[in-house]
Image (cartoon, rainbow, N blue to C red):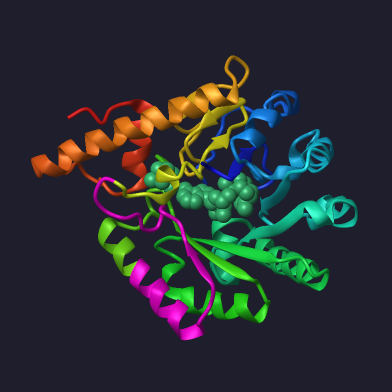
Amino acid sequence: MTSVIVLNITTACNYKCKHCLREHPTVEHFDIKILERNFEQMKKLGVVEFSITGGEPWLHPEFPQLIDTIAKNGFKFNFVTNGSAIKKYEFIFDKYRSSLSEVTISIDGLQKTHDFIRQPGAFDSAIASIRELVGRGIPVRSITCLNKLNIKEFEGIVSRLIDEKVSRITVSGAIETPENKFLVLTEQEQKLARDEAERVQKKFNAPFIYCSALSGGWGVDFCGALNSLDGLAINPKNELVFCCDTVRNGAVLGSLADHTFVELYKLAIDTVAYLKSKRADYIIDGKLPPKFNTCEFCNMCLANKICEV
Ligand SMILES: C[S@@+](CC[C@H](N)C(=O)[O-])C[C@H]1O[C@@H](n2cnc3c(N)ncnc32)[C@H](O)[C@@H]1O
Ligand code: SF4
Ligand code: SF4
């Protein structure tokens, strides 16, 4: 059972990054009440922590209320931010420190590349935020989404992150959307990127976490997030989705406005079984569709139900 649920609480963002998979035409914020009424079931099923993302989390109009209810109900939380406005999170560090497990800050390149992908000044803000958090003794995790521009400087990025004293380094890969094709690594480049990441990890002896978006496995059980359901997420429409590494609203299981958490959780188990049996058919047949071992295939199959053999 999943112990962490991702909360993708808002589509609102103060950046418009070139690689971003969250292009939403309208601003939507998820409903805290719908989450609250599922707390009990979540707890019984083993959920201990919420991983908060967006958009940019603080732009949810009831962000302080969300943090308060998560902490009061005995859950831990962490959040992911672009690091542009760490002051907006300051109330957490003062009042909810014991419930906060870590903060993740996105770093998508050295200064020039990061600012090109994100926006001018973004790198300096992100580094200043890392320093602020480290100074307060809060564990900081970084996440780098590898793409055609930043792979060449990955060693430099890691060296810088270690200098800045991040505790864990997450490496991901850019998932394709209709708008970001120019950045996305080919399957061959993705394999080389994984090799490069492993080389750098060894060189620095650093604590790395690899996301399936960079390199899933092979065979039927190609993604750990799928197998343990530890990518389950609630999107800004209050829907339970398989994984937040999906484009737009993700692979939707159903709305928590209409169903209980346990109903959708059981549907998740059945749908994973469906995906795996389809994968087994493809593998035995020997004709693998393009990108069979990537998030794109997973998205296509789970969200659009077009993994029919
Ligand atoms: C969607 S953002 C939300 C949190 C915050 N706004 C940020 O940028 O850190 C969470 C993470 O997803 C990553 N991301 C965005 N688009 C992606 C894509 N197409 N493929 C893989 N990761 C992506 C971002 O780089 C970021 O590290
Ligand atoms: S990657 Fe994060 S900061 Fe950039 S546009 Fe997407 S949600 Fe906003
Ligand atoms: S989209 Fe699918 S393959 Fe990719 S990380 Fe999520 S569950 Fe795994």
Residue at the front extreme, as displayed = 44
Residue 139 falls in which quadrant of the image? bottom right
Examine the rendered structure and indicate whether residue 197 appears above or below residue 219. below
Query: Is 110 in front, or is 229?
Result: 229
Query: Is 183 in front, or is 261?
Result: 261
Q: Residue 95 placed where, x, y %?
A: 90, 52
Examine the rendered structure and indicate whether residue 160 appears above or below residue 280. below
Q: Residue 158 placed where, x, y %?
A: 54, 76
Which span is picked out in magenta? 194-220
Q: Residue 37 placed where, x, y %?
A: 72, 24
Compared across the picture, whether 216 is left or right of 288 comes to right
Q: Is residue 219 magenta?
A: yes
Compared across the picture, whether 277 is left or right of 169 comes to left
| Residue drawn where x is 68% and y is 45% of the image | 56
Compared across the picture, whether 294 is left or right of 41 comes to left
Residue at the top extreme, as displayed = 258
Query: Is 260 in front, or is 190?
Result: 260
Q: Residue 148 placed where, x, y %?
A: 39, 62
| Residue drawn where x is 56% and y is 81% of the image | 159
Instruction: Answer whether residue 30 is visible to the viewer in this image.
Output: no
